[in-house]
Amino acid sequence: MGMATLNPQRTIAELKELRALTGDADGAQRVAWTDTWATARAWYRAKLAELPVQVETDEAGNIWATLRGATERAVLIGGHLDSVPNGGWLDGCLNVLAGLEVLRRVAAEGVPPVTLRLVDWADEEGARFGRSLLGSSAFSGTLDPESVAALTDRDGTPLPEALAAHGVALHGMLAAQRQQAGAAAYLELHIEQGPVLESMGLPLGVVIGTFGVERHRITFSGQAAHAGSTPMDKRRDAFGAAARLGLEIREIAKRHGGVCTVGSCITRPGIVTAVVGECIVTLDQRHMDAGELAAMLHEAQEASARFAAEEGCTVAWEPIWKIHPIPFHPELIAMGEAAIREVAGTAHRLPSGPLHDAAEVARAGIPTVMLFVQSLRGISHNKIEDTLEEHIALSVEALDRLTSSAMAWVQGGG
Amino acid sequence: MGMATLNPQRTIAELKELRALTGDADGAQRVAWTDTWATARAWYRAKLAELPVQVETDEAGNIWATLRGATERAVLIGGHLDSVPNGGWLDGCLNVLAGLEVLRRVAAEGVPPVTLRLVDWADEEGARFGRSLLGSSAFSGTLDPESVAALTDRDGTPLPEALAAHGVALHGMLAAQRQQAGAAAYLELHIEQGPVLESMGLPLGVVIGTFGVERHRITFSGQAAHAGSTPMDKRRDAFGAAARLGLEIREIAKRHGGVCTVGSCITRPGIVTAVVGECIVTLDQRHMDAGELAAMLHEAQEASARFAAEEGCTVAWEPIWKIHPIPFHPELIAMGEAAIREVAGTAHRLPSGPLHDAAEVARAGIPTVMLFVQSLRGISHNKIEDTLEEHIALSVEALDRLTSSAMAWVQGGG
């Protein structure tokens, strides 16, 4: 048994190695259920082969590396090697490779008091078929295989066929739930993918949970009319109503401390010479508090009806997707905060806007927490995604300390 | 020579005859440079053949029917048989067929004191190649053949090829300018294509000119960002800036008594989960007064720069098209007003939002005026375009009286 030495520089080197192996001039290309993804995972398995861990792939395609401890009760660390097309060098794989380094450190100290498991979730991004968190939702049991059976990629390949090519049978995926056995804590490190930590000048933050989300498509219907012959006071301008809503949702978000976004606006007939007859916008609203989220939704609905009436239009709402807020575990949040303070001096608690595999694990009732490391310019899902190397190193150290705390907590019956 | 009797009911019957011949369940299909358009024109030529007029097709494809008078000085009446696809039963062809009825009435009275000419302009709508007022702009000399030589229809057919199939050589079209010889007044009746007359309860109005138009494409560039991880105060929201402009241009229009329209809004990346990074809107501004139009443009540009700055965005303007206001002839306007008052009791002066062939004729320096007849619901370019038959009949009578006044005016040296 050698010295138990954590080497965050090795993580940085491995991230670069993976980038060279599975990226190109446009960025990372590890889209789940593709050859490049399989290449990344084979590379990762070779790394695991040097450790005293048991490696298995579950029915959902998630790869588990298990370092058996004195008890079956386990601390889980998770991440995902898959990326979006033309993605960044850190999103998802930092989690896995930082976890790998922690696993090395713990393994070097001999048989741990509790079991430690590292999971590489399959298809977090949903980049090819549009369904994110696929592997982790099979683990949590929230996946309905039938609801995704008809999905196809842009070439028309059905999802079940793509999964089968990688050894996964869609209708057997839920058997991955048995991996929940013994799971007592789940830890995940991720780049923030937002501007908060950078704007505060902090390298690291602890995540208090994932936002609840209300996502809707809103159609304003007025009357298409000639831009030249229709006086202003005779118009039923659907874009006018939508523009007013687009501005109002920003006030709603500020009042409630959440976020609201109109991400898409489609105008019909959509020509320069016609008043807009129909305007379709999407609205995405997020909050950590279910009550505040419901209030934001209610106020947006009310405002849309008011604007529609004032503009001589009608309005129709169509739900796209929703999820309740998922708070992380208070004791693990405190441990994450302490770990960050030890390595970086100052910690900050923040919600996660994006969903992560951690949200699925938390939904399964397993105590969960995440750490965020600063993203430069808040940008991800892009080849220019980046984080200072000194911050990456700090993040590996913080995950390592959090793992030790969590293992002690689980050992103590936490 | 028989009684000179105007028969507006015949015009209505002929409009229905033309609809049956060249329309279908989706509306009128007389798109210029198509077989259906040629069918309509052959039908029209057969009607002309019953009259003591000389018929010729000029180098731009415009059909001229000339009733020679005691002098070469001529009153022109114009319209267009071509329609948009799925168009209405009145737009353009009412003008021609009302003119035909007036020509019959005048011809029945013997050789008139001045020449009377009825022109069916080729391709007013520009529906197939995107260039409207094609025949009339050849007549006025404002057409630059080279600027349209590369246009193609949606099947890839080049404009010159389509014109050649109907006997028109693109680079010879400007020879149609010789039809200006002797032209001393131009009259055009058209459906309003707007809601003004209907809202005032009036069947007819006299048009004081066509609006000047400024048409621009405006691109706001901010930063695409994750809808969940980007706090409201960290956003550079291009849709927010565009929405503010979309509302501000309505205030600008009201302040100046013109019209301003955002007809198209495109968002990029345009997905529900991303703050809009780029938002492209079109702006169409119209006014009868060149100074007011320039002020409206200036204010919109200033507002766009202010909103962009406040939203952390940049803004770029790109001109699409512009035209100066084209005022019609004051004496002909007065004659048009008098003719309307005689047949309908009350007249209203209004600008034309849409351009018409009349605008091209006016640009050639020929005294011009238009009459508008009420459009039900203000709708045109649609199969539901409609006008009450009693109003159609009144419009033929008004055009007839205006023709008499204009001929007397020209005879008197007007």
Image: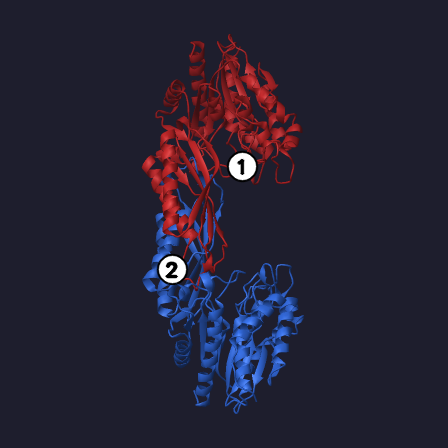
Chain colours: A red, B blue
Q: Which mark is residue A87?
A: 1
Q: Identity of the amino acid at label 1?
A: Gly
Element under disc 1:
loop
Where is residue B251? Give x, y as percent.
Answer: 34, 57
Residue at 47 percent across and 45 percent down: it is A264
Q: Which of B294 and A374 is in front in this view?
A: B294
- Residue A371 vs B278, above or below: the answer is above
* Front-lying residue, B26 or B169: B26
> How far across and how far down the image is residue B103, in percent?
54, 81
Which quadrant of the view contains residue B233? top left
Disc nearest the viewer among 1 and 2: 2
In percent of the image, x 63 and y 81: which residue is there?
Answer: B49
The residue tagged 2 is: A232
Q: Can residue B168 be seen in this view?
A: no
Instruction: Give the side of residue B382 with respect to residue A207, left or right.
Output: right
Which quadrant holds the N terminus of chain B? Answer: bottom right
**Precedes in sequence: disc 1 or disc 2:** 1
Up-down: is B51 above or below B161?
Answer: below
Query: In this orientation, which residue lies closer to the viewer: B302 or B257?
Result: B257
For the C terminus of chain B, the quadrant is: bottom left
